[in-house]
Image: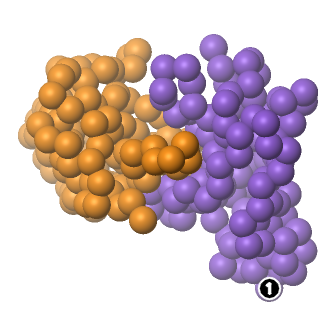
Chain colours: A purple, B orange
Amino acid sequence: SQKIEQNSEALNIQEGKTATLTCNYTNYSPAYLQWYRQDPGRGPVFLLLIRENEKEKRKERLKVTFDTTLKQSLFHITASQPADSATYLCALETGASKIIFGSGTRLSIRP
Amino acid sequence: GAVVSQHPSWVICKSGTSVKIECRSLDFQATTMFWYRQFPKQSLMLMATSNEGSKATYEQGVEKDKFLINHASLTLSTLTVTSAHPEDSSFYICSARAKIVGGSIYGYTFGSGTRLTVV
């Protein structure tokens, strides 16, 4: 069955640096992959979606890449700010139209 | 943008009682809604898919008689935890996806979640 892995449980970086989060999946390449932000005690908030035929997608300070050869997506936050501190989840949709999530990476940006 | 409203945001109930959680799509119609459960420091686990006008589809290991799902309209799905026990204490979250328009694909919109504590 399809699995998603986010290798880093936690990431702590200095304000102003670029945060890079990794998401790997195991089986078939999904038609698209999604990234969400989750704050404590809240539901996830959709950030970006990238299709399998797109190498890169940008939205303000966010950038997502999708490498179907490596079966990997990278999520970048440039010029990071303390307000970016949260848990970031990658997700993909299975053939049964169900979305499965990675375990998340807890990002902390220190001033 | 698409908004999903979930109520209550938290609830404390006694063991053996039932609790109902509501999930509403405010500005779009959702033929399908999803219910997740999340334990501390863990990811979201899909419990069931709620289909408007038909029975919900439950994931393996989720007791359908314990977690009753009703999707009576295109904007409302409810999850009832029956005969709740302390091990049912968790964070429950619903989600839906706004209709695909013009070939664009949107991400899922999530409710704000319900923290259930069974004492």
Q: Residue at x 28, y 31 (%)?
A: B50
**Could you say where residue B67 lies in the image, as x and y percent from the top left?**
22, 29
For the residue labelled by badge 1, is the local secondary structure a helix, a strand or a loop?
Answer: loop
Q: Residue at x 32, y 39 (%)?
A: B33
* Residue closer to the observer: B27 or A102: B27
* Residue closer to the observer: A78 or B88: A78
Identify the residue at the far front of this view: B102
**Could you say where residue B118 lies in the image, as x and y percent from the top left?**
23, 46
* Residue closer to the observer: B11 or B20: B20
Q: Tell me: residue B56, above or below residue A65.
A: above
- Toward which corner of the image does residue B87 lie, by quadrant? top left
User: Is residue B31 among the parts visible in the rendering?
Assistant: yes
Image quadrant holding the C terminus of chain A, namely bottom right
Identify the residue at the far bottom of this view: A111
- Toward which corner of the image does residue B19 lie, by quadrant? top left
Label 1 marks a residue whose chain is A
Q: Is residue B89 left or right of residue B118?
A: right
Task: Give the residue type at disc 1.
Answer: Pro
Q: Residue at x 74, y 25 (%)?
A: A29
Judging by the rendered image, the residue that carries numbered circle 1 is: A111
Q: Tell me: residue A52, above or below residue B98.
A: above
**Could you say where residue A6 lies in the image, as x and y percent from the top left?**
74, 41
Q: Is residue B78 left or right of residue B104?
A: left
